[in-house]
Image: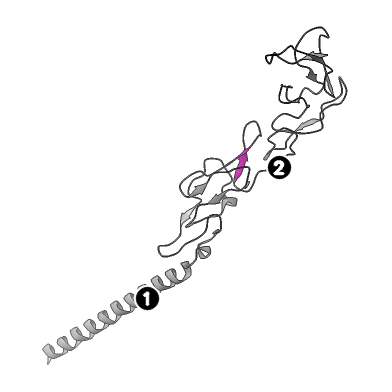
Amino acid sequence: MTALPSTGSAAQCSACPQYTFSYFNTQLGFCTCYDPNAQPLTAQNQTCQCFIGYAGTPAQTQNAPSGCLVCLSGWYSPGAGAACIQCPPGASATANQGACVCNDNSAGTIPWTPQNNACQCQANYFGDFSQATQYGTTGTCTPCPSGSTSQAGAAIVLNDCVGASSVVTSGSTSNTSSTGSTTTGSYILTVFWLLLCSYLLI
């Protein structure tokens, strides 16, 4: 039996919840889950649930093996009965395996959240987070070329930036034209000097 803490009214004893026990039948307080890897019971939570970073079904009898198993490396569980979920490419699990964190948090990156469970580049950036295999990596996300755009998380390679191909092609054409003009100018200058030398030798 157990009694909840005072809430301004007389405490009432009640039976321990399923899969729990009380150390002292006559002592007021909370019951304890059979499973040592289950979260402690509270006034708000009267159900045995696995710790953060664990998943499974808590032990249902006293002294039974724990049914809450720690998540595999690179996986996380927020607890409260949630299953283990694999962290996305470019992310690592936190120390308690209750969440993930992107390996690259430098300019142009979007922080990990449980809502999207992804590591991505901001709008107008491109990059491949699968290459960020170590925490502390930087430079995964690169700005799209001037005159091109991308939506958040949509651009992995340069050509994924909308308008990038035309910007790059325009730049290449300009460079080619400039190189051609320089070559033509050098040729004319060479011919001029050859003619001048021939004139002087006559």
Please report the residue visible at 65 percent of the width from the left and 43 percent of the height from the top.
Answer: 87
Please report the residue visible at 34 percent of the width from the left and 77 percent of the height from the top.
Answer: 177
Please report the residue visible at 73 percent of the width from the left and 39 percent of the height from the top.
Answer: 84
In the displayed structure, does residue 175 sit left or right of residue 14? left
**Three-letter amino acid code at disc 1?**
Thr
Q: Which mark is residue 26?
A: none
Q: Residues within 10 Å of mark 1 (few under 14, many from 20)?
A: few
Measured along the vertical axis of the image, is residue 65 above or below residue 148? above
**Three-letter amino acid code at disc 2?**
Ile
Coloring scheme used: one colour
Q: Looking at the rendering, in which quadrant would you find the C terminus? A: bottom left
In the displayed structure, does residue 147 sit left or right of residue 115? left
Judged from this view, the residue extending furthest toward the bottom is 202
**Where does the image place residue 122, in percent across and percent down from the top left?**
50, 52
Q: Where, by quadrant of the figure, is residue 4 drawn?
A: top right
- Magenta part of the protein: which range? 91-100
Residue that mark 2 sits on: 85
Please report the residue visible at 83 percent of the width from the left and 9 percent of the height from the top.
Answer: 25
Does the magenta portion include 94?
Answer: yes
Q: Secondary structure at mark 2?
A: strand
**Where does the image place residue 70, in percent across and percent down from the top left?**
74, 32
Q: Which mark is in front, 2 or 1?
A: 2
Q: Residues within 10 Å of mark 2 (few under 14, many from 20)?
A: many
Q: CA distance from mark 2 to mark 1?
A: 52 Å
Measured along the vertical axis of the image, is residue 80 above or below residue 171? above
In the displayed structure, does residue 108 sit left or right of residue 98? left
Residue that mark 1 sits on: 176
Q: Secondary structure at mark 1?
A: helix
